[in-house]
Amino acid sequence: MKLQDHFLLAMPGMDDPFFKHALIYICEHNSEGAMGIMLTQVTDLSVAEIIAKMNFLIADQREYRQDDIVLMGGPVNLERGFILHSKCIPAFEHSYAVSDQVWMTTSADVLQTIGRADAPEKYLVALGCCRWRAEQLEQEIADNVWLVLESNPRLLFDVPYDRRWLEANRTLGFEPTHLTALAGHA
């Protein structure tokens, strides 16, 4: 099972309140485990505030969107920033392609471009991430904790954070009330 560049959709029976109604984008999945960014919770910071704290703010040369908020990417590495973005040439210092359409960068050079013409066309900024050890995520999926669905850039970048879980359900063709926390095996 290859899960990189897929979404995890929290099932109704999710016990952990941190992950209730979560949608997570899997950035890496291999024999050592998995890493993803939660797309449905926010911090109290804006992208402009993060950039200002890093001394990149040059107000007369940049345009910031007021609705750019920083996501709570997960409970691990809360002090570390993760930027998911569309492909950008040239690539940033610590970037890698998650897919043909989505890149992840962990270096500050991507933040230096935000608000300028050379910024990625689509991006989101998160603090923290979600991690699973080897085979842990596969077991959680088997235990009906997560539903796996193919990713798409529209849901990742264009749908507001507070609508992503519902929109992910609808992408599968049903309303969340049609799901049950119980799993059956034939």
Image: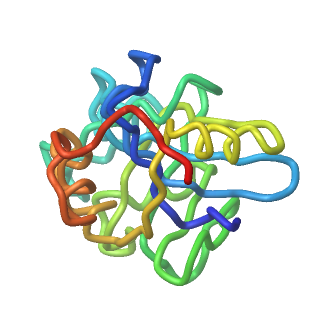
Residue 165 rendering spot, x and y as whole percentages: 26, 45
**Residue nearer the viewer, 110 or 37:** 37
Residue 111 visible? The answer is no
Q: Residue at x 63, y 51 (%)?
A: 107
- Residue farthest toward the front in the current orientation of the protein: 186
Q: Which residue is drawn at 50% across and 36% down?
A: 145
Rendered-image quadrant of the C terminus: bottom right
The image quarter in which residue 150 lies: bottom left
Rendered-image quadrant of the N terminus: bottom right
Vertical order, 92 against 90 (above or below): above
- Report whether 180 appears left or right of 178: right
Residue 105 rendering spot, x and y as whole percentages: 59, 57
Q: Residue at x 15, y 50 (%)?
A: 175
The image quarter in which residue 171 lies: bottom left
> What's the image's color scheme?
rainbow
Vertical order, 176 against 76 (above or below): below
**Residue nearer the viewer, 81 or 108:** 81
Vertical order, 137 against 110 (above or below): above
Total count of labels: 0
**Residue nearer the viewer, 71 or 163:** 163
Vertical order, 119 against 62 (above or below): below
Residue 184 visible? The answer is yes
Q: Residue at x 55, y 31 (%)?
A: 128
Residue 23 rendering spot, x and y as whole percentages: 38, 45
- Report whether 136 appears left or right of 100: right
- Report whether 70 appears left or right of 66: right
- Report whether 150 appears left or right of 31: left
Residue 64 rendering spot, x and y as whole percentages: 20, 51
